[in-house]
Image: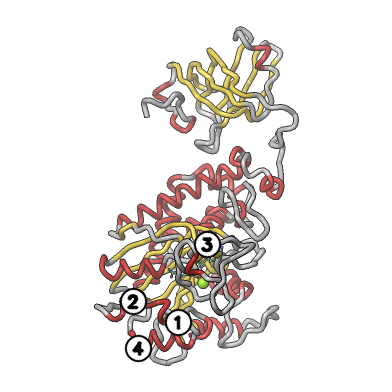
């Protein structure tokens, strides 16, 4: 970008050796040597490693420079020269160092480690740290990989609405959207709230999933995907739940569950490969400091076949485990996180796809199997995280879908347009939703989901 005022540290190249470059960044450390030099370690966030700047006492503002602290913002101009130091190809011999903004002792990100918990309290500053910087670069590359994979395979990127009047999962864990006066809402004849006077003339919420809208366009445009924020008002204070998270949702006409599981595996493999190719230094850091087996695990998954078992087989494996789980294992009840982790970590030692769940524990839109008891659901489970993907082949038969909705106590009038998709030119189709933050967790080894999204939203917390 030739109009940018500075060169990013990641873009400094050997071919620029001997020429004058300009960089901007934040001071990590400063070491003043007796010989009238100061060594400044500057990081600009463009890559894991910063660059060393050698400032000499001849610089007009040298005295001022020796009074800068960690976190000070600097703009440096100087010659790019080979570095005698280890682990860095070059350094900058400064001809000018402009102090844009100094800090003082109250700056929280002093040298030395600050805990992840503490960093959450300064989420506006934590992007300047190694760990969060690396996480956000990984997140960025996973986002790119997502778009590259789906658009590269002829999936059309479709933007589904965030405000909705339908509950996709039928679980009722939604944030309401309203402009009514909460203190004094208008009432209808029955004494309830009169939503006809609300902004949209009806009750609306933030979407828990773009799936229903995605299905509409897949059943006409073939293969589409959404990638956007989704919202769940579930009061889960865990290391893998957020109230606002990003979901990647492909939906494909003519796909059955079989192709759907293959699509999920191909997408994950593509992400792992892309990350190993583009984020080497960041992965090295996580591998060293956060999760020792990370690199080998990602490498192992690039070409791996992911195991696929039925829910019934999963229950058998758990019953045979000879292990005491906190929650009992019982055909018909949902797999708990401890069960999911046991399957991935102790039985398969990697991701596993579980299909054909009992219909009672899954959403209304999943296709009923011929056994009448299970649905064509698929969950992809990963070590340490548990469920990372949830999806299904969709129920494309109008009568079956209507009776499934009745069993779930859903009013068909609320889903009239969704039923139209089965009324007019219905086709088999399938899709899934991947929790993007859980993917970032899996690819970094970061233990808490609050640390893989820039500004986490969780129960009792929407700071920043
Ligand atoms: O399994 P879920 O609820 O599936 C759906 O919403 C489907 N409508 C998706 C589809 O078929 N198009 O959610 C999908 C994924 C989960 O597997 C999980 O990874 C993630 O979304 N997820 C969450 N991530 C963070 N915080 C939460 N509260 C999450 N709830 C679900
Ligand atoms: Mg799920």
Q: Are marks 4 and 1 in contact (CB under 8 Å)?
A: no
Residue 131 image-quadrant placement: top right
Which callout, 4 or 2, points to the residue nearer the camera?
4
**Dot placed on the residue nearer the N-terminal end, 3 or 2:** 3
- Comparing marks 2 and 1, which lies closer to the viewer? 1
Residue 20 marker:
none
Q: Is residue 9 left or right of residue 32?
A: left
Comes first in the chain, label 4 or label 3: 3
Instruction: Tell me which label, 3 or 1, sits earlier in the chain.
Output: 3
Marks 4 and 2, how far apart at CA: 19 Å
Q: Which residue is mark 3?
A: 177
Q: Count the marks: how many?
A: 4
The mark lying in front, picked from 3 and 2, is: 3
Q: CA distance from mark 3 to mark 2?
A: 35 Å
Q: CA distance from mark 2 to mark 1?
A: 27 Å
Measured in 3D between alpha carbons, the distance from the residue under mark 3 to the one under mark 1, in whole angstroms, is 20 Å
Crowding at dot 2, Cα within 10 Å, few <14 / some 14-19 / many 20+, comes out as some
The residue tagged 2 is: 256
Q: Which mark is residue 399?
A: 4
Q: Residue at point 60% right, 37% down?
A: 128
| Of 80 and 204, the residue lying toward us | 204
Mark seen at residue 411 = 1
Helix, strand or loop under label 2: loop
């Amino acid at each position: 970008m030739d109009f940018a005022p500075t060169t990013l540290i990641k873009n400094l190249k050997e071919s620029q050796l001997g020429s004058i470059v300009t960089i901007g960044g934040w001071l990590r450390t400063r070491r003043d040597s007796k010989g009238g030099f100061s060594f400044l370690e500057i990081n600009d966030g463009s890559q894991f490693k910063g660059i060393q700047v050698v400032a000499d006492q001849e610089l007009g503002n040298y005295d001022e420079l020796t009074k800068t602290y960690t976190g000070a913002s600097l703009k440096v101009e100087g010659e790019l020269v080979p570095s005698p130091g280890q682990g860095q190809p070059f350094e900058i011999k400064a001809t000018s160092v402009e102090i844009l903004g100094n800090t003082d002792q109250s700056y929280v990100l002093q040298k030395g480690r600050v805990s992840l918990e503490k960093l959450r309290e300064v989420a506006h500053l934590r992007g300047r740290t190694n760990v969060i910087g690396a996480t956000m670069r990984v997140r960025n590359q996973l986002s790119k990989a997502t778009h590259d994979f789906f658009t590269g395979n002829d999936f059309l990127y479709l933007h589904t609405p965030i405000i909705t009047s339908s509950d996709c999962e039928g679980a009722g864990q939604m944030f309401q959207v309203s402009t009514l006066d909460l203190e004094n809402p208008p009432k209808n004849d029955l004494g309830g709230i009169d939503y006809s006077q609300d902004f949209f003339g009806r009750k609306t919420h933030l979407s828990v999933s773009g799936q229903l809208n995605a299905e509409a366009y897949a059943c006409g445009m073939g293969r589409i995907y959404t990638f956007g924020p989704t919202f769940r008002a579930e009061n889960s204070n865990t290391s893998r739940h957020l109230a606002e998270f990003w979901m990647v949702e492909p939906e494909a006409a003519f796909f059955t569950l079989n192709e759907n599981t293959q699509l999920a595996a191909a997408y994950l493999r593509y992400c792992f490969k892309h990350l190993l190719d583009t984020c080497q230094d960041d992965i090295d850091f996580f591998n060293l400091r956060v999760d020792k087996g990370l690199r080998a695990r990602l490498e192992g998954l690039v070409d791996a076949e992911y195991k696929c078992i039925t829910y019934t087989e999963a229950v058998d494996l758990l019953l045979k485990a000879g292990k005491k789980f906190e929650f009992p294992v019982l055909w018909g009840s949902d797999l708990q996180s401890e069960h999911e982790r046991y399957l991935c970590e102790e039985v398969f030692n990697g991701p596993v796809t579980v299909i054909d769940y009992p219909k009672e524990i899954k959403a209304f839109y999943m296709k009923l199997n011929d056994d009448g008891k299970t649905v064509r659901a698929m969950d992809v489970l990963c070590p340490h995280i548990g469920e990372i993907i949830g999806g299904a082949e969709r129920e494309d038969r109008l009568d079956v879908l209507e009776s499934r909705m009745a069993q779930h106590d859903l009013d068909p009038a609320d889903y009239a347009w969704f039923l139209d998709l089965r009324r007019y030119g219905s086709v088999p189709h399938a899709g899934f939703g991947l929790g993007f933050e859980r993917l970032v967790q899996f690819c970094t080894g970061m233990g808490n989901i609050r640390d893989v999204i820039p500004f986490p939203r969780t129960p009792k917390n929407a700071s920043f």
